[in-house]
Image: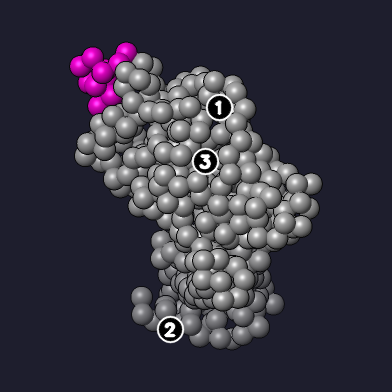
Amino acid sequence: MSYLVRMAWRNLGRHRGRTALSLLAIVMGVFVVVIAKGVIDGMVGSWLTYSINLDSGHVRIIQPEYRLKERTLSLSYPVGDDETPASVIIDKIRSVPEVQVATGRIRFGMMLAASASARDPQDAQDAYDAQEMVMGIGVDFAEEEKAVRLSQFVRGHGAAGDTARDAGRLPKPGAREILLGRDLMATLGVEVGDRVNALFSTSFGSLRIATFRVSGKIESGLRMLDESTAYIPLDVAMGLLDMEGSVTEVVVFGRSAELASKLQAQISAALANMAGAGAGVSLRELAIVPWNEHNELIGFVSQAKAIYTVIYIFLVILASFVVFNTQLMVVSERTREIGMLSALGLAPESIRRLFTIEGAILAAAGSAGGALLGALFNLWFGRVGIDLTGITQAMSSEILITPRLYPTTDLRVLVYSFVLGVAVTMAAVYIPARAAGALKPTEALRIV
């Protein structure tokens, strides 16, 4: 076998241009697969992370009717009531072994405008003409920090030397404070430390006005957070919305998203036991929704991943056509040489192995080179990012993708791409190698 390897290596060096072209084709095919998978995995991974953290959690507990009318931000289908407050339900969920964080949220619609007591009365008066409808979310910031870390998005930018304004922070429990997005604040003409008026409807359908102090500025790059979301303390939201002891949803985080089904089953059993103990018949009716059933886009992403896999294979197949054609040309040009080798006693199987080894060297070298270049590309742009501002501006704000994409670099992807490149290239080499082994010495030596 060693002499065949030496012969194959020598043969590849005889036509360096042709060998280089074949190598380049394999390198580019595998390179494109690595960067495409890194970019797509980075985009999908980022979207899923933000979607889970800011929206669905690993598991979400809601009323079934609320799911149908969620887009209207209805307060008519709460979790928790006078008989069984939401806090009791949440405490029970926290006792489940797989649960790491369980917290209530209240989503509601409200209109915001700058308060007349803002920093600059003239700016506040101008802001009345820029009233904005936003989604308000009442949250327990202490619990949210354990899983979501909203503080990572908070920035305070006030007047120079104004310590209060520079200290952007999360709202405090029980305080009439609000956390707003950067673009929303610019539209309203307010800064950290200013006040905004909020008009909203309570759970009884009555209108109410409240004034909040802006405690911090969200700069996330996510349009939904920066343009149309306002966070307030959960206890304040309960009081203002006439929802004492109730929330619109309970969001639960476990050890990982992959264990959501197990988490769902455990929570279902815990709530069933709680209802059986007389804590409230309504507990039996709660919907326990895992993250992968929360959004229709998640199903589309799963289908897209399968399509992308086919595209990856197709890209490498296109690259392997260069190797296939090159090897066919090599067999045609070396027909007399093959005939002489056969006449000297080299078995057809050995000739087939010779051409197979040549293809294997090309496949291994090209796939390794493509995987390495792809890894370097993803590592570099994984640090500096790829600007997608133009694309994200055209997307719906509900799609949680930041304007800067960071491709991922995963050893499993590199191994997958390398194996794919070798496998497809070897499949392309098989036919020329088989044709070379099938040549008869007498017929091969007649070729001039």
Q: Would you call the spot at circle 3 few (<14 residues within 10 Å), some (14-19), or many (20 or more)?
A: many
Q: Earlier in the sequence, mark 3 or mark 1?
A: 3
Q: Is residue 255 magenta?
A: no
**Tag shown at residue 202:** 1
In the rendered structure, the answer to whether residue 288 lies left or right of residue 168 reads left
Locate residue 381, reporting x and y percent.
Answer: 57, 72
Kindly report the distance in space between the C-alpha atoms of the residues bearing marks 3 and 1. 14 Å
**Disc 1 element:** loop
Report if residue 8 is visible in the image.
Answer: yes
Q: Is residue 269 magenta?
A: yes
Disc 3 target residue: 137
Locate residue 339, reporting x and y percent.
Answer: 55, 73
Which amino acid type is shown beneath numbered disc 1? Thr
| Location of residue 160 with respect to 171 vertically, above or below | below
Q: Quadrant of the N terminus?
A: bottom left
Q: Earlier in the sequence, mark 2 or mark 1?
A: 2
Foreground residue among 160 and 296: 160
Disc 2 target residue: 6
Give the prevailing secondary structure in the magenta stretch: helix
State which region is magenta. Answer: 266-281
